[in-house]
Image (cartoon, rainbow, N blue to C red):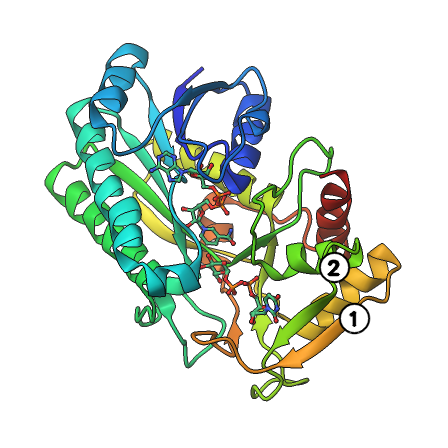
């Protein structure tokens, strides 16, 4: 079976994708500096090599030794507000380190590259659902650091056609492994469903609702929440797609269905059976009112079919995982 390098595989989405790859017989080596990831999230038979993307000699030696068939690149810095106060961290870890990794992939002739991009590359879209050809206008350093990485990937493919890629633009990723083996463990996570689960468990006094005057049905922001296991499966399909020699491309990952912040809060209250406190506060800077994916390209090209697209299932799996932490 093919051997795959998964950078950031000790983190939230990378660990779920590693699980999906291993369950289909792929051999996986995770490369992670454990800055936000956890060694326990890398389940055997996947192997963990602790290292930083910036340690290019170490990474190059690993590639020479293991002879990978593909790279799934999750490692990066992901907190949007932090990217505004510390942009250099984001351009260094997301853009520079991705550029170096691509250079090594070309040098070691690793043919398939799958990249974790984000809906943040679209900024504040005027038209939703958002298709892959919607205008690209990121409004924060996080989104720009990812868009620049996309350009490096595309330019490298143009120069080296044997380097093929799939760029996956994730919308809001949530939930946990239905088997309860792994979940989102980042200690200071800011994501809505995780924060709501922590509040239901009494680990926070209340949940702040950022902005209630948006032009949406209840005044709160609308997002497209995708179950992490469905997203992990999209990565496996993307890898199969490239290994079958099919064309490189960019794909949105979401369900095409949006929920308001209040609807999410109510879903977490329902599954947890806890009527926790919320507080309406000002808008959070940089939040678009509505972000919904058009996933038709992913569904048609890769035959991707969501299996966990039920907001209460997503909320329950996140809550059950949180209660174990
Ligand atoms: N979570 C979301 O909703 C979301 C949405 C869109 C895109 N993404 C992207 O998906 C990817 C994974 O996100 P996640 O939510 O799993 O985050 P995460 O923080 O759980 O995972 C990131 C992993 O990368 C590792 N890492 C970071 N910098 C590294 C470096 N320099 N060298 C080696 N390892 C390093 C961390 O230790 C961690 O294990 C990121 O690239 C992120 O930008 C996430
Ligand atoms: O305590 C909270 C946390 C969030 N929100 C709101 O909930 C929505 C979702 O927020 P969050 O879960 O933080 O996700 P986003 O800001 O939408 O960003 C996520 O989704 C993007 C893609 O859509 C990715 O690029 C980012 O990496 C990822 O963090 C937003 O309207 C927030 O204002 C609250 O009201 N209270």
Asked whether residue 32 is in view, the answer is yes
Judge left or right: residue 96 versus residue 320: left
Residue drawn at (30%, 45%) of the image: 93
- For residue 76, which quarter of the picture? top left
Ligand 2 within 8 Å of the CB at mark 1 = no
Residue 147 location in percent, x, y?
Answer: 28, 57
Judge left or right: residue 280 versus residue 95: right
Read off the residue under disc 2: 199
SS under mark 1: strand
Residue drawn at (49%, 34%) of the image: 236
Number of callouts in the render? 2
Asked whether residue 310 is in view, the answer is no
Quadrant (top left, top right, bottom left, bottom right) of the N terminus: top left
Read off the residue under disc 1: 277
Quadrant (top left, top right, bottom left, bottom right) of the C terminus: top right
- The answer to whether mark 1 and mark 2 are in CB contact below 8 A is yes
- For residue 72, which quarter of the picture? top left
- For residue 124, which quarter of the picture? bottom left
Disc nearer the start of the sequence (1/2): 2
Q: Ligand 1 is in which quadrant of the figure?
A: top left
Q: Is residue 230 above or below residue 80?
A: above
Query: Which residue appears farthest toward the top when viewing the image?
Result: 65
Query: Which residue appears farthest toward the right when viewing the image?
Result: 273
Residue drawn at (33%, 22%) of the image: 69
Q: Is residue 16 above or below residue 300?
A: above
- Which is more toward the observer, 189 or 236? 189
- Which is more toward the observer, 165 or 124? 124
- Which is more toward the observer, 294 or 148? 148
Residue drawn at (25%, 40%) of the image: 97
Judge left or right: residue 70 versus residue 38: left
């Amino acid at each position: 079976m093919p051997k795959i390098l998964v950078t950031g595989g000790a983190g939230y989405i990378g660990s779920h994708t590693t699980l999906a790859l291993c369950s289909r017989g792929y051999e996986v080596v995770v490369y992670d500096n454990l800055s936000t990831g956890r060694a326990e999230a890398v389940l055997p038979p996947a192997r963990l090599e602790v290292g930083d993307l910036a340690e290019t000699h170490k990474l190059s030696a690993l590639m020479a030794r293991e002879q990978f068939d593909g790279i799934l690149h999750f490692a990066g810095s992901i907190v949007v507000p932090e990217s505004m106060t510390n942009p250099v961290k984001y351009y260094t870890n997301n853009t520079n380190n991705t550029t170096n990794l691509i250079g090594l992939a070309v040098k070691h002739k690793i043919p398939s590259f799958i990249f974790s991009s984000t809906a943040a590359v679209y900024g504040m879209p005027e038209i939703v659902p958002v298709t892959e050809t919607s205008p690209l206008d990121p409004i924060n350093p996080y989104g720009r650091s990812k868009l620049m990485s996309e350009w490096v990937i595309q330019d490298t493919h143009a120069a080296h056609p044997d380097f093929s890629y799939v760029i996956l633009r994730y919308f809001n990723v949530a939930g946990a492994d239905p088997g309860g083996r792994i979940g989102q463990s980042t200690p200071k996570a800011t994501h809505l469903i995780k924060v709501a689960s922590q509040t239901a468990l009494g680990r926070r006094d209340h949940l702040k609702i950022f902005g209630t005057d948006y032009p949406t049905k209840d005044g709160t922001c609308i997002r497209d929440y995708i179950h992490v296991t469905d997203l992990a499966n999209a990565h496996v399909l993307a890898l199969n797609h490239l290994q079958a020699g099919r064309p490189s491309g960019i794909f949105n990952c979401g369900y095409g269905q949006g929920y308001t912040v209040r609807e999410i809060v109510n879903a977490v209250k329902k599954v947890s059976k806890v009527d926790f406190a919320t507080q309406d506060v000002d808008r959070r800077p940089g939040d678009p009112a509505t972000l919904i994916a058009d996933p038709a390209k992913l569904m048609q090209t890769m035959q991707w079919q969501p299996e966990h697209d039920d907001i209460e299932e997503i909320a329950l799996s996140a809550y059950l995982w949180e209660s174990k932490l």
